[in-house]
């Protein structure tokens, strides 16, 4: 059994929203942490139908619950009307709810009770390196970090699971919710989004590739974010001398998705595809680290109009990081970091690579990827001030 970092301590003091994309392991985690708690799984047809027809049944069934009791409702977005009952039970009986879901979009609709700040928001990310004994970097780059994907017994099993994942996502999250008018155009958008994964978002260019307008593309990206399938990394905007690009970069929530959509498999160091996936995995780990440590708005990237760039900037120019999937960092790889240092002299400079040993090279820390990940999760790369 893999020990997850997220332990949902907030449930001791009140109620919690637990969001996470499908198959990140929310249900497994909740069953492990709260084995004796009352558990409403809205993916169970009978439970769903019973509560959908009459949400007040929840209040009736919990009328004798004690103050501080933890009650779990899994996939709460399927019946948003239950939140009115949850609100009443929180305020009148001090029941502590854990409300899990994979789609925050339905909970943002007009008229949905969001509990007025009475529930703390938590996100469960895919697996991270710190949770896996004998973590295999090459495996992670290829399979991604969803539990069922990383632990797949073979490439063929992984492919089938990825195919099913994309199909279920399109069917249940997009088609069933009628979030888009034309599923074919959205399917094409997913492919184009994969091609631009980790790149600056240009809505106009993507719209032309998909045969829709830029407004529709923005809505499609919003759907990916609100269904927790992807997220934007904003640009670092503090200008000193050089003009900076302001467009965000988009990343799918797990590297397995662009791998599948772009037919990338058996990736090995030395190829451009491996380099893209390697960078994505590192950004994925940083995003999870910041999320689990409640550090908000700390990750950006830096890109000038003259072509200098840094893959990740943490804090207000406190740490600048480049990801190079090479086995020997050379002077040419320092170009972006050196330019960043000229404008932000106190920044710590790091290059994460596939070198076997850590070293200092022209005031830049060269770190093997595994060392970087260990230090990241030990809080040695960045902590909030």
Image (cartoon, helix red, strand yellow):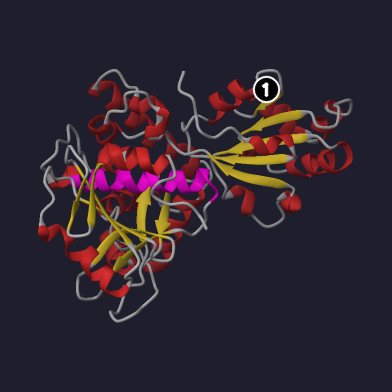
Task: State the image quarter where residue 302 is shown.
Answer: bottom left
Query: In the image, 384: left or right of 381?
Result: right
Which residue is at a point 65% across and 18% down the rendered structure image? Answer: 35
Q: Position of residue 167 (x, y in %)?
A: 38, 35
* The residue stretch that appears in magenta: 275-294
Q: Which sits in the foreground, 19 or 243?
A: 243
Q: Which sits in the foreground, 261 or 120?
A: 120
Query: In the image, 229: left or right of 212?
Result: right
Which residue is at a point 14% across and 45% down the rendered structure image? Answer: 326
Q: Position of residue 8 (x, y in %)?
A: 62, 35
Query: In the image, 218: left or right of 244?
Result: right
Q: Is residue 170 above or below residue 199?
A: above
Which residue is at a point 67% across and 40% down the rendered structure image? Answer: 16
Q: Name, please, the residue furthest toward the bottom.
A: 241
Q: Is residue 153 above or below residue 244?
A: above
Q: Position of residue 197 (x, y in %)?
A: 29, 52
Please name the residue that numbered disc 1 is placed on.
Answer: 46
Local secondary structure at mark 1: helix
Q: Main secondary structure of the magenta part?
A: helix
Residue 230 belongs to the span the image colors magenta: no
Task: State the image quarter where residue 259 is shown.
Answer: top left
Q: Which sits in the foreground, 155 or 329?
A: 329
Task: State the image quarter where residue 151 is shown.
Answer: top left
Residue 304 appears in the picture as rendered: yes
Q: Is residue 357 above or below residue 361?
A: above
Few, some or many residues within 10 Å of mark 1 (<14, 14–19, 20+): few
Q: Position of residue 209 (x, y in %)?
A: 26, 60
The image shows a total of numbered marks equal to 1
Residue 79 appears in the picture as rendered: no
């Amino acid at each position: 059994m893999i020990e997850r970092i997220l332990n949902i301590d907030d449930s001791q003091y009140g109620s919690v929203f637990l969001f996470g994309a499908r198959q990140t392991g929310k249900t497994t985690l909740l069953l492990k942490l709260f084995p004796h708690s009352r558990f409403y799984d809205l993916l169970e047809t009978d439970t769903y139908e019973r509560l959908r027809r009459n949400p007040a049944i929840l209040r009736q069934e919990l009328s004798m619950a004690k103050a501080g009791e933890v009650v779990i409702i899994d996939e709460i977005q399927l019946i948003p009307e239950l939140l009115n009952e949850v609100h009443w039970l929180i305020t009148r009986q001090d029941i502590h709810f854990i409300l899990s879901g994979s789609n925050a979009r339905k909970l943002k609709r007009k008229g949905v009770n969001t509990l007025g700040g009475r529930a703390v928001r938590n996100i469960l990310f895919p697996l991270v390196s710190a949770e896996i004994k004998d973590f295999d970097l090459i495996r992670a780059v290829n399979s991604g970090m969803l539990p069922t994907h990383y632990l797949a017994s073979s490439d063929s099993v992984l492919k089938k699971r990825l195919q099913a994942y994309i199909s279920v996502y399109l069917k249940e999250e997009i088609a069933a919710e009628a979030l888009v008018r034309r599923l074919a155009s959205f399917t094409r958008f997913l492919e184009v989004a994969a091609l631009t994964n980790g790149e600056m978002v240009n809505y106009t260019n993507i719209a032309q590739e998909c045969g829709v307008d830029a407004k529709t593309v923005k809505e499609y990206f919003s759907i990916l974010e609100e269904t927790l399938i992807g997220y934007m990394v904003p640009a670092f905007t503090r200008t000193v001398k050089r003009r900076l690009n302001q467009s965000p970069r988009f990343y799918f929530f797990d590297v397995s998705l662009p791998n599948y959509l772009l037919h990338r498999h058996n990736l090995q160091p030395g190829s451009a595809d491996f380099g893209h996936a390697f960078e994505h995995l590192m950004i994925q780990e940083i995003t999870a680290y910041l999320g689990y440590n409640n550090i908000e708005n700390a990750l950006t990237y830096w890109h000038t109009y003259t072509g200098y760039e840094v893959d990740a900037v943490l804090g207000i120019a406190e740490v600048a990081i480049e990801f190079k999937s090479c086995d020997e960092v050379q002077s040419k790889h320092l170009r972006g970091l050196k330019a960043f240092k000229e404008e932000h002299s106190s920044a710590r400079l790091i290059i994460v690579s596939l070198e076997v040993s850590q070293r200092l090279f022209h005031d830049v820390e060269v770190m093997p990827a595994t060392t970087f990940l260990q230090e990241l999760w030990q809080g040695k790369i960045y902590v909030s001030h």
